[in-house]
Image (cartoon, rainbow, N blue to C red):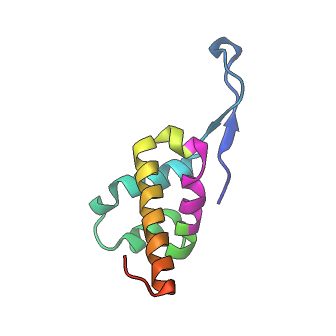
Amino acid sequence: MAEPQRHSDDATSGTDDRLALGDREQRMLALEREWWKYSGAKEQAIRDLFGLSATHYYQALNALIDTEAALAHDPMLVKRLRRLRSTRQKARSARRLGADI
């Protein structure tokens, strides 16, 4: 997955370089926000929109939601995705240890 791109602002804006999401990263977050609007399976939408397998897409998405740029772009969505990931990780750990959640 590509790292967020750095864009320089004009001197008139008063800020230095800042992190901004690239087009692909923005489209990934848009898909996660509205994937249910796509007809068919989400995995097919991933393949059609990004040309990636679901495994590669989710690897890229997990890296993306850990960035400050993604959090700044869509805080509610990124926090929800992080929370869902954490819940899944806890459930997997519990299954490995033989405990029920």
Q: Residue furthest top?
A: 12
Does the segment drawn in magenta span residue 67?
Answer: yes
Q: Quarter of the image holding residue 88?
A: bottom left
In the depicted view, which residue is nearer to us: 86 or 19? Answer: 86
Does the segment drawn in magenta span residue 19?
Answer: no
In the depicted view, which residue is nearer to us: 8 or 90? Answer: 90
Q: Which residues are magenta?
A: 59-69
Q: Residue at x 41, y 73 (%)?
A: 43
- The image shows residue 65, relative to residue 75, as above or below, that is below
Q: Residue at x 29, y 62 (%)?
A: 36
Q: Position of residue 70 (x, y in %)?
A: 54, 45
Q: Is residue 61 left or right of residue 44?
A: right
Q: Quarter of the image holding residue 52?
A: bottom right
If the image is split into quadrants, where does the N terminus sit?
bottom right
Secondary structure mostly taken by the magenta-highlighted segment of the chain: helix
Q: Position of residue 42 (x, y in %)?
A: 37, 70
Q: Quarter of the image holding residue 55?
A: bottom right
- The image shows residue 89, relative to residue 66, as above or below, that is below
- The image shows residue 76, relative to residue 81, as above or below, that is above
Q: Position of residue 7 (x, y in %)?
A: 68, 33
Task: Report whether residue 31 is seen.
Answer: no
